[in-house]
Amino acid sequence: MHTFVSQDNKYLSAQGLITSVVELAQSRDINLHKLLRGTGIFEQDLLNFQHAFSVSQQVRLLAQFKLLMKSTDSGFLLGSQLINDTRAEAQALIYSDNLAQVLKQLSLLRMQLAPLLFSQTYIKNDNVYIYIQPAHGLDESLYRYVLEIYSTAFYSLLKRVSESYPHCQFDFAFKRPRHIQEYEQNLGLKVSFDKPCTRWVLNKAMLRAKNPHASQLRFMQAQSQLDNKNVVSMTFIEAVCRYLYSHPSANLECTAKHFAMSSATFKRRLKLNGVRFSALIDKQNKHKAIYLLTLCAKHNEQVAEHLAFYDIPNFRRAFKRWTGLTPNQLKTQ
């Protein structure tokens, strides 16, 4: 079983997102003490490279930053700054040979680089599909903000490691925002909303294109630094989601047993992370159903059986509740 961290475990460095938040806020003349108020982060902590921070501290800092910035472009600005991260984790991405190696490194190092999200990647026909989910319990507004940040950071990374202008489709599972111009300016014109799930779509040919900034020496130097670090594998919520995705018929009792907990302790742990078990089951079943219906072209009956629905009308009703669409409507989209 995987080792995982909770939202209060301290393992994150100030370098990266936290430093970028502080720098961007100060460039807008936001008082540092006001920014850090209520986050559990103190000014002296930012100067101590040995000090570690928790995801919950990072989340509180982001929420405070979003509130104080009072602008629709702040998430995109922050995301574009993350490409300047000087940590070994970020350098391992920038100096990789090609995008395939970048994505591999990003998957291995996501807990240091983007701990609020996790992804599942599929290659089908000519495309690479990267499905995005929250790795922690985030309210809807903050989750959208996090998606703005990391979608921009990902697109900035694509532009850095691509010889030609990269084309990426961004599908978001929320309604079209009023500040659509910020999305198009920072993510390009291939942006869609009201989709059944959030995903990034790339052309498969991009994977093997040479990175113009590739450096085997710098990549190996970054890897050497990382070898001396304890790399965290995943969050508790991600671990639960991945288990449920692979075990569609799992109930609360058997899931709790898998994580060596009583049902009561497991429910308390979920509550501390801001999520409910039923919501996690619905979300993983939705993602699995979408994958089977679209990328695998399975029939409704096959998908229903895989998800332990032995009544097709019940499966259709559940799918409509998850996505707002019937399975056939999804296929025609």
Image (spheres, grey):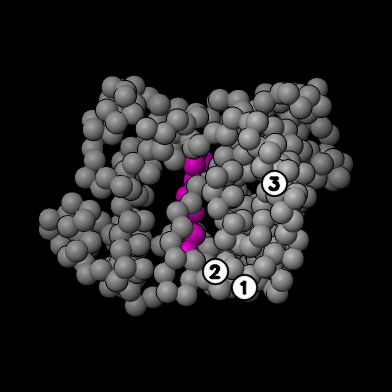
Residue 26 visible at all: yes
Tell me the number on the disc at residue 91: none
Q: Mark 2 or mark 1, which is nearer the start of the sequence?
A: 1
Point out the frontmost of discs 1 and 3.
Answer: 3
In the image, 63 versus 122, the foreground residue is 122
x 54%, y 69%: residue: 202
Q: Residue tagged by mark 3?
A: 220
Q: Mark 3 or mark 1, which is nearer the start of the sequence?
A: 1
Tell me the number on the disc at residue 202: 2
Q: Give the range drawn in magenta.
A: 129-140
Please name the amino acid that badge 1 sits on: His
Residue 177 place in picture, x, y as percent: 59, 62
The answer to whether residue 190 is above or below residue 146 is below
x 54%, y 33%: residue: 232
The answer to whether residue 168 is above or below residue 281 is below
State the CA–CA distance, disc 1 to disc 2: 7 Å
Q: In which quarter of the image is residue 304?
A: bottom left
Q: Is residue 122 left or right of residue 302?
A: right
Please name the amino acid that badge 2 sits on: Leu
